[in-house]
Amino acid sequence: MAQLGMAFDPNVVPKDDLTPEGAWITMQVVAQSVEATKAGDGQILVLRMQALDGPIPGKVHFERLNIINKNATAQSIAQRALRNLCDSIGHVGMLADSDVLHGKPFQAKFKTQAASGGYDARSQVSAYQAVGGVAPASFAGQQPQIVVTPAAQPAQQPAPQPAARPAGTPWGR
């Protein structure tokens, strides 16, 4: 057990866990993963984003996008959000690996999702745009295509073969 050396009352410290609504904040994806949905029949792209500016630089925000879901509406919302994120960083073409999203600045506008079902209120991205509000030059009006397919089982690779040895003995070469 670690003694704090003081009596801390969390009730007298204001919460700042919600990102302010309406302002465009420059962010970047710093980590990402794909998880199974709770029912096990879909996939969620989890994006860990970090603020590069705004009222709390360095603040971390998580977005969970239901990229594969039996609920067509949930899947459509997530895929549109992913497409908008791709537009904001200038990604054009197929997106098969979420690493493409990593480390590229974009701007996000937040809204507050009200508390419900025993969960606290939380910040949620309501829109994405390129830094400065202008699409990157690499976008050039092209339409990115996002194809989401269930993750394949890793292919089994054959065991590596030992390197071929030169003919003869080392002292006879």
Image (cartoon, rainbow, N blue to C red):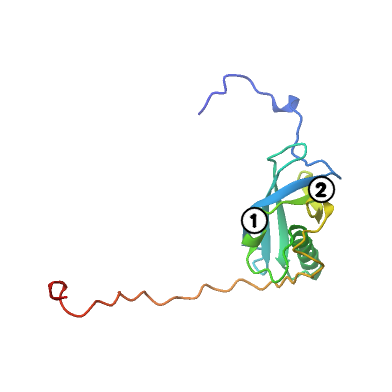
Disc nearer the start of the sequence (1/2): 1
Residue farthest along the front direction in this orientation: 173
Query: Height in image: 14 above or below 83?
Result: above
Q: x, y (%) of residue 167?
A: 20, 80
Residue at the location (79% across, 61% down)? 84
**Could you say whether the residue bearing mark 2 is in a helix, strand or loop?**
strand
**Could you say whether the residue bearing mark 1 is in a helix, strand or loop?**
loop
Q: Which mark is residue 66?
A: none
Q: Residues within 10 Å of mark 1 (few under 14, many from 20)?
A: some
Quarter of the image holding residue 163?
bottom left
Query: Height in image: 36 above or below 49?
Result: below
Residue at the location (72% across, 60% down)? 65
User: Mark 1 sits on what residue?
Assistant: 102
User: Amino acid type of disc 1?
Assistant: His
User: Amino acid type of disc 2?
Assistant: Phe
Q: Looking at this view, is 38 or 109 the one in front?
A: 109
Q: Residues within 10 Å of mark 2 (few under 14, many from 20)?
A: many
Q: x, y (%) of residue 126?
A: 83, 53
Q: Is residue 61 left or right of residue 129?
A: left
User: Mark 2 sits on what residue?
Assistant: 110
Q: Looking at this view, is 145 or 92 the one in front?
A: 92
Query: Height in image: 106 above or below 156?
Result: above
